[in-house]
Image (cartoon, rainbow, N blue to C red):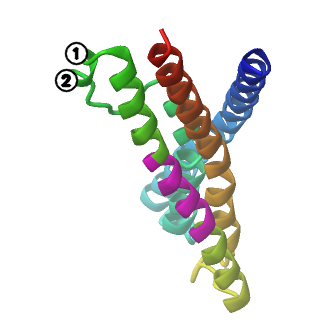
Amino acid sequence: MGLKFEKWLNQMDKFTRSSSRHLEWVGVIGIILMFLVNLVDVVGAKLFLWPVPGATEVISFSQIMAIAPAIAITLLLNRHIRVEFIIMRFPKRIRGAINSFSSFLSLVIFVLILWQSFVYGQSLQRAGEIGSTSHIPFYPFAYFIAFCSIPVCLAFLVEVLKSLSEVVKNGSG
């Protein structure tokens, strides 16, 4: 069972990394869109006295497109903030227990973010909320946040399982 579990865990990790890399490109498109809309808006407003209508809303939506997909890849590349200088002094088993508890709490938070973003998207969709000047509907962006939370949840699930595996492995030896 241990070998099958590790193989499954590695497959889950590969899938999470692959989906996060693909989502990262959506984030890059969001950043480029922010840049282009801002550029066209500033040049249009300063040179031609014609700003882009709804530019602030489009830039705000682009920020969602840039930030939400980056969370998973940032987590997987260990580019997020962690305070480990004290934990690194503990034995492996205690470190594994602390890491699994921390990752579990993070998993719970992101499951809640996923769920509430989906619920919020449904309420925005039912209400027909749209941007006041851009007339872009809000709900796809709430659904997008929920969708981008899936690889984050998978990454934390893999972390929890790897940490628990470390606890069990170091506890028996």
Q: Nearer the viewer, residue 172 or 120?
A: 172
State yes or no: residue 88 in magenta: no
> What is the C-alpha distance between the residues marked 1 and 2?
6 Å
Q: Is residue 12 above or below residue 57?
A: above
The span shown in magenta is 105-116
Q: How many marks?
A: 2
Q: Nearer the viewer, residue 97 or 13?
A: 97
Label 1 with label 2: CB-CB less than 8 Å = yes
In the rendered image, the residue lying farthest to the left is: 86
Q: Horizontal and vertical percent for residue 75?
A: 50, 32
Lateral position of residue 82 relative to residue 114, left or right = left
Q: The residue under label 1 is which amino acid type?
A: Arg
Q: Is residue 166 visible?
A: yes
Q: The residue under label 2 is which amino acid type?
A: Ile
Q: Horizontal and vertical percent for residue 143?
A: 68, 64
Q: Residues within 10 Å of mark 2 (few under 14, many from 20)?
A: few
Which residue is disc 2 drawn over?
Answer: 86
Q: Quadrant location of the N terminus?
A: top right
Q: Is residue 80 visible?
A: no
In the rendered image, the residue lying farthest to the front is: 172
Q: Secondary structure at mark 2?
A: loop
Q: Horizontal and vertical percent for residue 127?
A: 67, 91
Q: Is residue 153 above or below residue 55?
A: above
Residue at image point 60% right, 39% down: 157
Which residue is disc 1 drawn over?
Answer: 89
